[in-house]
Each structure stands twice: as C-alpha cells, then as structure tokens.
Image (spheres, helix red, strand yellow):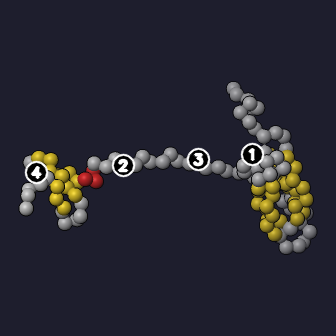
Amino acid sequence: MRNSSLYVSSQNTTKVKLGKNNLMTQSENIPKPKPKPPVPKKFQPITVVDCNTDSPRIFTQCYKCEQPLLIQTHHDGSEPIDHRIECPSCGAIAFFAHAPKIATVMPLGEVASPSTVRRK
C-alpha cells in the first residue's frame, strides 16, 4: 500500500497531513454558513374601549397595510364566534375578532406611507 497524505480515521472524518504532527480535519476547511439576520417582529396595536357595554369598540390597524381601523362589535347575549375582518383598503384579512356580531368596520385616516410621514 502506498503512503498518502489522506487517510480515514476511526470517526469517519478525512484528515489531511500538514506537516510534523499537524493534522487538520477536512470539515475545518469548509466555510461556516453566515447567520441569517433576525426577522423583525411585527405587532398589531389593539385598544378596546367600552368593554362593559353591549357595543365595545376596537381600535387597531390592518396587519398588512397598517390602515387604522375602528371595529364596532355588538353583544346581544348569543354565543361569540370567530370573525375574519377584511381591511376596507387592501382587502386582506386585517383582524380576527371573537364576538357574536360585527356591526361596522371603518377606516380611520390614511395609511402611513414614506411621503406622508413627518420627519423631524
């Protein structure tokens, strides 16, 4: 058998002979993957007013286009169900509400865009 600089160790990793007693595994030559940048978390602000009445109101914004919304619900004593509330601006599902009835969904103001945001 020929004497070569590559051989397999007992752990099934290939080692390369570098010189006198200097051994380096082949896995050390492979560049490590770069860590992915963290994904910013997106939160949806919610303010509930008139909680103790039959018609509580929810102030929130669309999850997709960030259009401010006012959602008026009505509690008539019936069992609450899940509602998918669509954004009147973009048509995407803006909010999930758990209430007996949804009375109205109204857009408030304008969607904040880079041209409408005030800079100091």
User: Which x, y percent locates residue 34?
Assistant: 42, 46
Task: Give the mark, 1 or 3, whose residue is nearer the N terminus.
Answer: 3
Separation of residues labelled 2 and 3 (CA atoms): 24 Å
- From the image, tell me which residue sits under label 4: 21
Real-space Cα separation, disc 1 to disc 4, in angstroms: 63 Å
Q: CA distance from mark 3 to mark 4?
A: 48 Å
Q: Which residue is mark 2?
A: 32
For residue 117, side relative to residue 76 (left or right): left
Q: Residues within 10 Å of mark 2 (few under 14, many from 20)?
A: few
Residue shown at 34%/47% (left/top)? 31
Which residue of the protein is positioned furthest toward the bottom in this rendering?
Answer: 79
| Amino acid type, residue under disc 1 in the picture | Glu
**Label 3 SS:** loop
* Image position of 110 with respect to 44: above or below: above
Q: Nearer the viewer, mark 1 or mark 4?
A: 4
Separation of marks 2 and 4 at Cα, in angstroms: 25 Å
Query: Mark 1 and 3 residues: CB-CB less than 8 Å, in contact?
Result: no
Mark 4 or mark 3, which is nearer the start of the sequence? 4
Amino acid marked by disc 4 = Asn
Estimate the spatial distance between the alpha carbons at disc 1 and disc 2, rounded to whole Å. 38 Å
Labels 3 and 4 touching (C-beta < 8 A): no
Q: Mark 3 is on which residue type?
A: Pro
What residue is disc 1 on?
A: 66
Q: Residue furthest top?
A: 120
Mark in front: 3 vs 4: 4
- Quarter location, residue 72: bottom right
Q: Which residue in the protein does label 3 denote?
A: 40
Name the residue at 88% across, 65% down: 101
Mark 1 element type: loop
Q: Which numbered disc covers residue 18?
A: none
